[in-house]
Image (spheres, rainbow, N blue to C red):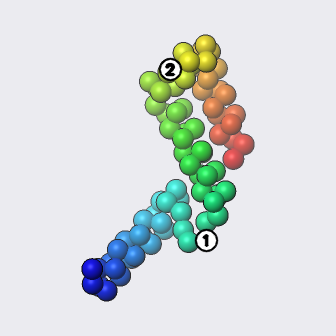
Amino acid sequence: MQASDRFNINSQLEHLQAKYVGTGHADLTRFEWAVNIQRDSYASYVGHYPMLAYFAIAENESIGRERYNFMQVFNCF
């Protein structure tokens, strides 16, 4: 690997980190990273109906109640 390749990879990573919030940055703490992952996971669960239905069945709740519960946790962040 040459120095120019390393520079290109680092510049691409910096670009992604600036563009997308969830990719983190050098000063991101472990806790902040974990909160981002958890927030993104809950947003994905609410946004994907089959996954939401799976959780509703597993917890023996209605889909609307499960969506409400996820949104309440999501709003705590």
Image position, residue 65 (x, y; %): 64, 20
Residue 38 shown left or right of residue 73 in the figure: left
Where the N terminus falls, by quadrant? bottom left
**Residue at 54 percent of width and 45 percent of height:** 40
Left or right? Give the position of 10 relative to 4: right
Mark before the other along the chain sequence, 1 or 2: 1
Residue that mark 2 sits on: 53
Q: Residues within 10 Å of mark 1 (few under 14, many from 20)?
A: few
Tell me residue 57's x, y (percent). 54, 15
**x 63%, y 32%: residue:** 70
Q: Decide: few, some or many residues near mark 2? Use Cα within 10 Å; few <14, some 14-19, many ≥20.
A: some
Residue beneath the point at 69% across and 41% down: 75
Question: Which quadrant holds residue 43?
Answer: top right
- From the viewer's perspective, is residue 18 above or below residue 48? below
From this viewpoint, is residue 56 visible? yes
Whole-percent x, y for residue 22 in the image: 52, 56
Decide which of 43, 27 is in the foreground and name it: 27
- Asked which secondary structure carries label 2, the reply is helix
| Residue 63 shows in the view | no
Camera-nearest label, 1 or 2: 1
Residue 55 found in image quarter: top right
The residue that label 1 is drawn on is 27
In the figure, residue 8 lies in which quadrant? bottom left
